[in-house]
Image: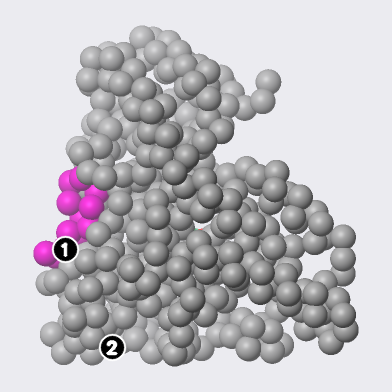
Amino acid sequence: MKPIYLDYNSTTTMSQAVIAKVNEVSQYPFNSSATHSLGRKANGIIDEAKAKINEFLNCKNYEIIFTSSATESTNTIFFGSDFSQIIISDIEHSSVYNCRPPHLKVSEISCLENGVVNIDDFIKKIPQNKENFLVSVMACNNETGAIQPVEEIAKITHQNLGLFHCDIVQAVGKIAVDLEKLNVDYASISAHKINGPQGIGALLIRKGLDFRPLIYGGKQQKSKRAGSLNIAGIAGFGEACALAQKNLDDFQKISILRDYLEENLQKITHNNIKIFASNTPRLVNTCFYAIPNISNQTQLINFDLNNICVSAGASCSSGTISQSRVLKAMNVANDFLDGAIRVSLSPQTTKNEIDYFIKIFNEFYQRTKK
Ligand code: PLP
């Protein structure tokens, strides 16, 4: 039996059109540095992918630097710029949260109990001298799905002469993302979260802004990121962006299944359950819940034995389960901290799959409730 996969915020399946594109491009020995016809063709493929990314994110005024991942994109800016201070939120993904160049002061903005970044606290963290600071706040949280007020944060940052980086990894393909409108200076994006290939991402950087490369070597990408480009990955990334753009409205329909799931979880537990960020705008595919005093480890084992793939948020990223830093930042009570499970759906998720999840959850809950 194929696993029931409900962990789409972690990674997605490559769509058929993306696989076809990657396969087609993989038939050729493309190197964009070559001066022969195949080199020119490779550059054409890169341009085509960039055009699709531009169309998807409205980012004509941004340079697109291809990287291996959003993690690399963020590291490039944090390590490669001469800021004297970085201000991040305390709910950032570890690719931002743990990216702390030793010479830099890093301050953290707290969040509210609903999982939204606290703007008042952000204003307090802005350095008095307004000198040379970078603010980095994610567009949507990967665990709770809470949509963050990044347009407002970018505005306040600029009014105070800082620059703004946004991790848009979980937002793209799920809500409309317009870089011009958000007015971000830098953004990190990853293909594998939007049905694209793994191992390819991009750094989007407002034209005119400069940075030191993270990776030195050849003159690829105007020496800003050395190394032969992943042409098949880039082609697949472009295709994934075009599809995500086309399917954005359809994506919103997932809320019907997600809400159905949550209503059932509430019924089974007689409301003895917390659904995080449910009282604030959040991604329609994400349900992050906790039941008190039933550990997520026990739940995960039970789901796994029943062929269901879910996660305990990002906290199990190293294969071990610890309490979620995001939930702690939201001041979640201890009883609930250990019992948190993230279920994340996709347009491919069926009602049968959700019914099966509900059945397994119910059997488990009746066995273990105290
Ligand atoms: N930012 C967020 C919000 C994420 O969810 C992830 C992946 O889990 C990343 C960044 C890292 O992306 P990548 O796997 O491309 O490094």
**Nearer to us in this view, 174 or 367:** 174
**Nearer to us in this view, 75 or 191:** 191
Disc sitting over residue 227 in the figure = none
- Secondary structure that dominates the magenta span: loop
Neighbours of disc 1 within 10 Å: few (<14), some (14-19), many (20+): some
Say which quadrant the C terminus sits in: top left
Compared across the picture, whether 347 is left or right of 132 comes to right
Whole-percent x and y of residue 123? Answer: 14, 71
Q: Amino acid at mark 1?
A: Ile
Residue at 43% x, 48% y is 174
Secondary structure of residue under mark 1: helix
Residue at 25% x, 37% y is 278
Residue 4 seen in render? yes
Secondary structure of residue under mark 2: loop
Q: Residue 213, relative to residue 365: is it above or below?
A: below
Whole-percent x and y of residue 240? Answer: 60, 54
Neighbours of disc 2 within 10 Å: few (<14), some (14-19), many (20+): some
Mark 1 = which residue?
A: 119
Query: Residue 3 appears in which quarter of the rendering?
Result: top right
Compared across the picture, whether 56 is left or right of 33 comes to left
Disc sitting over residue 132 in the figure = 2
Query: Per the image, is 39 magenta?
Result: no
Query: Residue 344 appears in which quarter of the rendering?
Result: top left
Q: Residue 53, relative to residue 146: is it above or below?
A: below
**Of label 2 and label 1, which has the lower sequence position?**
1
Q: Residue 168, relative to residue 6: is it above or below?
A: below
Magenta range? 110-121
Say which quadrant the N terminus sits in: top right
Q: Residue 151, relative to residue 276: is it above or below?
A: below
Query: Residue 327 appears in which quarter of the rendering?
Result: top left
Residue 312 seen in render? no
Residue at 39% x, 13% y is 362
